Image: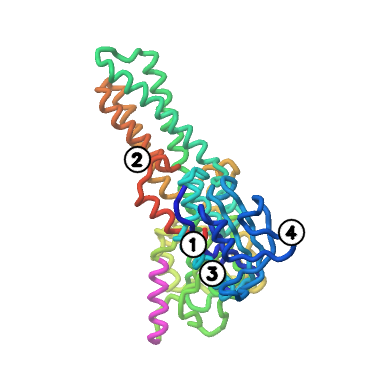
Amino acid sequence: MFDDTIAAIATPLGEGGLAVIRISGPQALAIADHAFTPVGKNSLKPSAAPTHTIHFGKVTRNGKTIDEVLVAVLRAPRTFTREDVVEITCHGGVLPSKLVLDTVLAAGARLAEPGEFTRRAFLNGRIDLAQAEAVVDIIHSRTDLALRAANEQLAGKLSQRINQLRDDLLKTLAHVEAYLDFPDEDIPQETQTQLLKRLEAGAAFMAELLRTADEGQILRRGIRAAIIGRPNVGKSSLLNQLLGHDRAIVSPIAGTTRDTIEETANIRGLPVVFIDTAGLREGRDVIEVEGIRRSRATLAKAELILHVLDASEPLTEADKHYLTEFADKKRIVVRNKTDLPLKLELPADSRFTHHVSVVDVCCLTGTGLEALKDAIKAMVWAGEIQNEMLQVMINSRHQDALNRALAATQLTLGALRAGETLELAAMDLRIAVNAVGEIVGKTTTEDLLDLIFSQFCIGK
C-alpha cells in the first residue's frame, strides 16, 4: 500500500461521449468528497457510500459547477489496485475532463505517472508482472487473436506455468543445497536420477516456450510487409484492396506515390503493417528521389516483400533486377492485371525465383485477394493457430529471461551428470531460478519496473 493518492484521466483525450477520471489511494474517498456534490435523495458522498455503488451529482470548485457526473465508489481490496478507488465519469471532451481532473488534484491527489495504477496493482499483489504486461497488450491489440492471447496472459495462464517451472527449479536447488551442507555424503543414484529428470523436463518446457517467441512478437506488433514494384503496376490499388478502403491515391500517371504509406490490416487473424512504397526507379525530381530513398529504407526493415508485377506486360530488365535484389527476403510475387491478356512469364533461373510464392490477382475486381491473404499467412506463420499456443505466447523480455534460465539449467545438468562439485551446480541453478522469477516479478529491480511501466499510458 502507498501513502499518497494518485489521479489521472483514464480515457483517451479528445471529444467523445464520456471521459473517466480515476483516483486511487488511501485518501481517494476523502478527495472525492471535496470535489463531488451528490444530487438526489439516494446519492451519497463517496466516504459514506457502500462499495461498488454509483452516485449522481456534480463536480464543483470554488462554488461553481464544473460538470454533472457519475461517481463509482470501489473500496479496497476489491479493486484493480487493491486500494480505495473512485472513478468519476463526466462528459467527454478535452476541457470538461481536464477541469474535473484539476479539481481532484487541487483537493489533494497527485497526477499519476504512466502505468502507475497497474504498477500499484502489481506491487500490491493484485497481478504479477506478466499479467501487468498483458494489460498493455490488450490496449494495443489489433486483431482478435492478439486480444485472445493477451486475455489468456492476463488470466494468468502463462504465469501458472512459469510459477510451476520456478517451483520445480527451487525444489531441485533445495536438494542440491541440502547435500552441500553434508559434503561427505554423495547424492544417491536414485535421488540424482529424479533431479536430472526434473531439470530435463524444465529445460524442455523452456525450449517449448521459446519456440512461441516469434509468433508472440507477430501477434503483438504485427509484421511489416512492403509493397514494391515498378511505377504504375498497381501497388496502391493492391494496398487499397487489402485494407478494404481507399487509402492510397490510384492514378495511371507513374510516380503518383511520392512517400511511403503505412496501414495495418487483419490478415487471417494476424496484424500486418502494409507499406505502399514509391515506385522503384530513378527519381525525376527532388521529391520523387526522397520518396524512393524512404522506400529503400523501408525495404531494409520489412519482414515480407510483396513484389507487384504487371501480368499484361513482358518481364522487364528492371523487374529482373528487383527480383534478384530482394532474393534474400521472404517474398510473394503478385502478378496483377490478370484480367488482361497474359504476357508475363517468370524466368526459371533460381536467382529470380528463390523463396518466391506466386499469386495472381486483379486489383480491379478483387480476384485472387483471398489466395494472397492465405499466402501471406503461410509465409509468416506455419500451421494452424491453436488456442493452447495463445495461452503461452511470450514476449521479448520473457524470451531473454528464458534464454538465460535455459542456459543455466543446461550447465547445471552438465555439472550433475559429470559429477562436478555441487557448488557449481547450485550457482547455475540459482541463476536459472532468478531468471525465471523475473518473468512474473518474483525477481525484480526498480529499473526493470520503470522500463516496463513506462510503456503504459497515464491513467492505466
Residue indicated by mark 2:
404
**Category of crowding for the residue at label 4, using alpha-carbon neighbours closer than 10 angstroms: few (below 14), some (14–19), many (at least 20):** few
Mark 4 element type: loop
| Foreground: disc 2 or disc 1 | 1
Circles 4 and 3 in contact, beta carbons < 8 Å: no
Chief secondary structure of the magenta span?
Answer: helix
172 is higher (above) or lower (below) than 84: above
| SS category of the residue bearing label 1 | loop
The answer to which of marks 4 and 1 sits earlier in the sequence is 4
Residue on which the image places disc 3: 103
Residue 134 position within the rendered picture, expressed as x and y whole percent measured from the top left: 52, 50
> Are the two marked residues, 3 and 1, in contact with CB atoms closer than 8 angstroms?
no
Side of 197 relative to 334 (left or right): left
| Residue at the extreme bottom of the image, as rendered | 285
Disc number placed over residue 42 in the picture, else none = 4
Mark 1 crowdedness (10 Å alpha carbons): few <14, some 14-19, many ≥20: many
The answer to whether residue 419 is left or right of residue 456 is left
Marks 4 and 3, how far apart at CA: 24 Å
Mark number, residue 300: none
Residue at image mark 1: 109
For the residues marked 4 and 2, what is the alpha-carbon distance in whole angstroms? Answer: 58 Å
Instruction: Indicate whether 132 appears above or below 365.
Output: above
The answer for how far apart the CA atoms under marks 3 and 1 are is: 9 Å
Q: Give the range drawn in magenta.
A: 285-299
Compare residues 40 and 192 and report the one nearer the observer: 40
Question: How many neighbours does mark 3 have within 10 angstroms: few (below 14), some (14-19), or many (20 or more)?
Answer: many
Earlier along the polypeptide chain: callout 4 or callout 2?
A: 4
Residue positioned 33% across, 20% down in the render:
178
Question: Which kind of residue does numbered mark 1 sit on?
Answer: Ala
